[in-house]
Image (cartoon, rainbow, N blue to C red):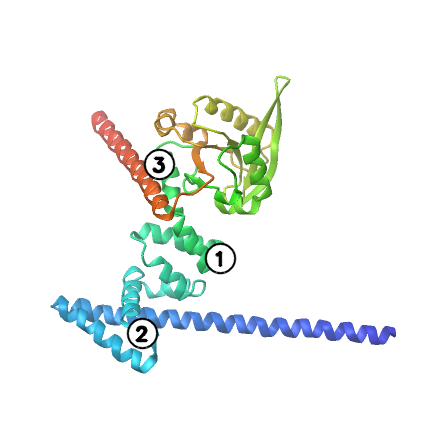
């Protein structure tokens, strides 16, 4: 083949690649526009019907409106407008009352994303999952998995440690961490857990939080001629700081606090770079001693403790267990806030 023929063939392949890029970009833009149009149609229909139902003086009559309208719309436009879907649209318009916000989110989330958000009970939970879906570019399946794995509740359980004066930012950690993807058996050593995390680092980073990057395993620190080794070291780009992680088998012990404090002091002195915030630490235990953790107030020194579960119970039991821990965490926060309020009143 001559140089001219070869050059011509490469030019044709390059032209094909660029032409394909233009077409695919246009197709993606058209799909986004179609998705936004569909989402807005459902939102506006939900608001229209919802206003009619809520404006009715009789609840039974309002229910009849939805049933009758759904039947007629199905005859004209298909099953997308049947009664149960109309109720979803009404709920959608009620939960997202600002059309401009719907327009903005609709450019990034599909109607099916919004449907996954509808069963959530609080605006705070919806806001959390919307932020995660947009920030991480979650598929509908990914969003449903995050909801099923109680991402919001686990973040709030971790936040329950962080009250008042703190060196740990809120909304960073979770408790418990669900590490079922590691495939560990009933009995394992800390080394096995560490090795499993290294093998499946991508999944662990997704569980750990947004913007975490792996730095080093068994980070060596020489202090007074003695060798110390931190299990895992990460860097959080959003927080602009190092995150030290220690893995422990069994229940949390107060002695772990001193060990992590030492590691954070060393990292702050020798590894922290210009422009970075002070390092923070995460101690992962099989069981978190929550009363000890509360009494120690480690968050003031930049340390958080969380449980990890390497095997998940059945779905209903998982939800019940996390809900129980979540409610207990909320009670602790409420109690501390009440105590702090009483102290302020006493000093006035």
First-in-chain label (2 vs 3): 2
Of circles 2 and 3, the one toward us is 2
Residue drawn at the location 14% of the way across and 68% of the way down: 60
Residue 160: mark? 3
Quarter of the image holding residue 45? Answer: bottom left
Judge by depth and name the residue closer to the eye, 140 or 99: 140
> At which x and y percent is residue 20?
63, 73
Which element carries disc 2, helix, strand or loop?
helix
Q: Name the N-terminal-most of marks 1 and 3.
A: 1
Q: Quadrant of residue 252?
A: top left
Whether residue 211 is visible to the viewer of this picture, yes or no, is no
- The percent position of residue 64, horizontal first and vertical second, equals 18, 72
Q: Is residue 92 visible?
A: yes
Residue situated furthest front in the rendering:
186
Query: How dense is the environment of label 1, judged by Cα within 10 Å: few (below 14), some, or many (20 and up)?
Result: few
Q: Residues within 10 Å of mark 3 (few under 14, many from 20)?
A: many
For image coordinates 47% across by 69% down, the residue present is 32
- The residue lying toward the viewer, choosing from 219 and 104, is 219
**Which residue is the site of mark 2?**
81
For residue 246, above or below residue 199: above
Q: Secondary structure at mark 1?
A: loop
Quote the CA–CA distance across marks 2 and 3.
43 Å
Q: At which x and y percent is residue 108?
A: 45, 63
């Amino acid at each position: 083949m001559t140089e001219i023929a070869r050059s011509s063939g490469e030019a044709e392949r390059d032209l094909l690649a660029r032409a394909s890029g233009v077409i695919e970009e246009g197709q993606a833009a058209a799909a986004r526009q179609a998705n936004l149009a569909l989402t807005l149609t459902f939102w506006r229909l939900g608001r229209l019907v919802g206003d009619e139902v809520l404006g009715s003086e009789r609840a039974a009559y309002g229910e009849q409106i939805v049933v009758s309208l759904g039947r007629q719309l199905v005859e004209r436009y298909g099953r997308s407008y049947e009664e149960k879907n109309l109720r979803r649209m009404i709920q959608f318009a009620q939960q997202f009352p600002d059309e401009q916000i719907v327009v903005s989110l609709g450019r990034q989330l599909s109607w099916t994303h919004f449907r996954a958000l509808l069963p959530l009970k609080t605006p705070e939970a919806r806001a959390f999952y919307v932020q995660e879906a947009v920030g991480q570019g979650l598929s509908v399946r990914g969003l449903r998995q995050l909801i099923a794995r109680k991402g919001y509740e686990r973040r709030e359980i971790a936040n329950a440690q962080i009250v008042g004066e703190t060196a740990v930012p809120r909304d960073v950690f979770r408790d418990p961490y669900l590490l079922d993807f590691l495939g560990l058996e009933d009995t394992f050593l800390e080394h096995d857990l560490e090795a499993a995390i290294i093998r499946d680092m991508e999944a662990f980073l997704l569980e750990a939080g947004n913007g975490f990057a792996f730095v080093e395993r068994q980070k060596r620190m020489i202090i007074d001629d003695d060798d110390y080794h931190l299990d895992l070291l990460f860097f959080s780009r959003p927080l602009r700081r190092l995150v030290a992680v220690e893995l422990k088998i069994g229940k949390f012990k107060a002695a772990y606090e001193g060990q992590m404090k030492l590691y954070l002091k060393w990292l702050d002195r020798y590894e922290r770079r210009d422009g970075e915030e002070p390092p923070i630490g995460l101690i992962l235990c099989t069981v978190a001693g929550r009363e000890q953790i509360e009494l120690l107030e480690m968050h003031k020194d930049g340390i958080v403790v969380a449980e990890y579960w390497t095997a998940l119970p059945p779905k209903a039991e998982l939800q019940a267990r996390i809900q129980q821990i979540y409610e207990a965490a909320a009670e602790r926060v409420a109690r501390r806030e009440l105590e702090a309020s009483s102290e302020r009143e006493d000093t006035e």
